[in-house]
Image: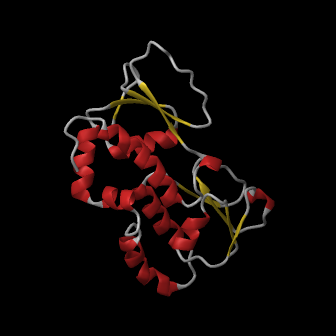
Amino acid sequence: MFIVTTPMCKEILKLAKIKDFKVNVKVDNEKADLAILLSENKTKLPSLAIKLNTFSQIKESIRKVSKYNEDKAVATDLENILDNLYNNFDVANRWSDEHKRNKLQTINSQIKVKVYSKFIKDIVEDMGFNIVNQNPDYVIFPDYLQLKIDEDADYVLVELPTHKNAPLNPIKRAEIRYSILEKISHNIKNFKL
């Protein structure tokens, strides 16, 4: 099976131990049996759409992609890979720990945010923030949007990096985005993890 993927998904195929694949920004330029790409991308090829915004989505995407691994021995190793996936990542490890995650979500539920992007909404929901359309404490937007600062507004703008401003590795990309949003939590009085 010939698989093609985009640079943003390449690391997931490596983590799923897929050995034979090609990376191309324009997957439709390849004569592939399967294209693995982000859910917001479109292709004419048979495809597997994955999401890589949250730590749980990253793990689920590795599971999905691993089904295309022709080496059946990898399947037995998959749970071990997933169990240890975030060991070297502080933020990911914190959000994978159920106790810490619940505590952080409780703190974040007090914070009202307005969101400008589907991928940011995935992250913000995962982190437990209270999403509102009016009177937010924070407005969270991707770096490709140019929001004008309203001098009279009572909210703070928070910009998240995308595309060229974020690492291709989805875990490192999520780490950066989560760590930026964790700073919002730290602004709450009596914040303790």
**Residue 42 visible in the shown view:** yes
User: Residue, x 50% and y 85% (percent of image)?
Assistant: 72
What colour scheme was applied to this rendering of the protein? secondary structure
Q: Nearer the viewer, residue 58 or 142?
A: 142
User: Residue, x 41% and y 83% (percent of image)?
Assistant: 76
Residue 166 in percent (x, y) is at: 58, 51
View extreme (left): residue: 190
**Residue 67 visible in the shown view:** no
Q: Nearer the viewer, residue 65 or 12?
A: 12
Eyeballing the image, is 147 above or below 168? above
User: Residue, x 44% and y 12% (percent of image)?
Assistant: 152
In the image: residue 22, left or right of residue 75: right
Q: Specify the quadrant of the image occupied by residue 13.
A: bottom right
Q: Nearer the viewer, residue 172 or 191?
A: 191
View extreme (bottom): residue: 73
Eyeballing the image, is 77 above or below 173? below
Residue 79 in percent (x, y) is at: 38, 75
In the image: residue 24, left or right of residue 129: right
In the image: residue 79, left or right of residue 104: right
User: Residue, x 31% and y 40% (percent of image)?
Assistant: 185
Residue 113 in percent (x, y) is at: 38, 30
Residue 109 in percent (x, y) is at: 27, 36
Q: Specify the quadrant of the image occupied by residue 97.
A: bottom left
